[in-house]
Image (cartoon, helix red, strand yellow):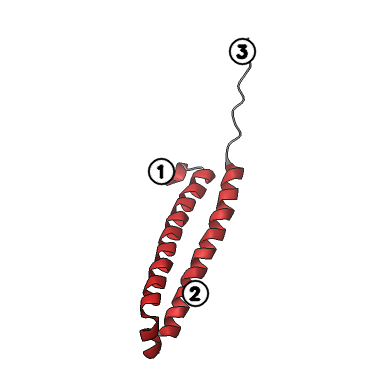
Amino acid sequence: MSENTKTPLEHVNDVLAQLKEMRHYAKNNVETLTAQWLLFDGELKKLKQSGPIETLMTRQSELHDALEEEIATLEKLAATLQPPPEETSPQA
């Protein structure tokens, strides 16, 4: 289906899929960085590099939270864009 013929619901679902993928990677990045942080926390403090890493971890966490909020908002929007169910006529 070409971009010009997509419905608003299809566009919202495309954006949702992309945001969910971003959320997945953001979560993995936070987990990986946290694991590294725990392994080398003492050394980073000795090298005076703990502050910048903490800032990065905080920003990555904030991105993850913002993605969660936007996904929830778009999921609600997608629900409102769903076409009404087709009524079935009673069979005689």
Q: Is residue 6 left or right of residue 44?
A: right
Q: Looking at the rendering, which quadrant does residue 69 occupy?
A: bottom right
SS of the residue at dot 3? loop
**Mark 1 → mark 2, Cα distance in angstroms:** 39 Å
For marks 1 and 3 on the same chain, the one whose residue lies earlier in the sequence: 1
List the residue tagged with mark 3: 91
Number of callouts: 3
For marks 1 and 2 on the same chain, the one whose residue lies earlier in the sequence: 1
Front residue of 36/67: it is 36
Q: Residue at x 45, y 45 (%)?
A: 4
> From the viewer's perspective, is residue 48 above or below residue 66?
below
Q: Residue at x 42, y 56 (%)?
A: 21
Percent x, y for residue 62?
Answer: 52, 69
Residue lying at the far top of the rendered structure: 92
Percent x, y for residue 73?
Answer: 59, 54
Percent x, y for residue 89?
Answer: 62, 18
List the residue tagged with mark 1: 2
> From the viewer's perspective, is residue 85 above or below residue 46?
above
Q: Residues within 10 Å of mark 3 (few under 14, many from 20)?
A: few
Quadrant location of the C terminus in the rendered image: top right
Q: Residue at x 43, y 59 (%)?
A: 22
Front residue of 73/11: it is 73
Q: Residue at x 40, y 63 (%)?
A: 28
Front residue of 38/18: it is 38
Q: Residues within 10 Å of mark 2 (few under 14, many from 20)?
A: few
SS of the residue at dot 1? loop
SS of the residue at dot 2? helix
Name the disc covering residue 67, or none: none
List the residue tagged with mark 2: 58
Q: Is residue 80 left or right of residue 32?
A: right
Front residue of 91/33: it is 33
For marks 2 and 3 on the same chain, the one whose residue lies earlier in the sequence: 2
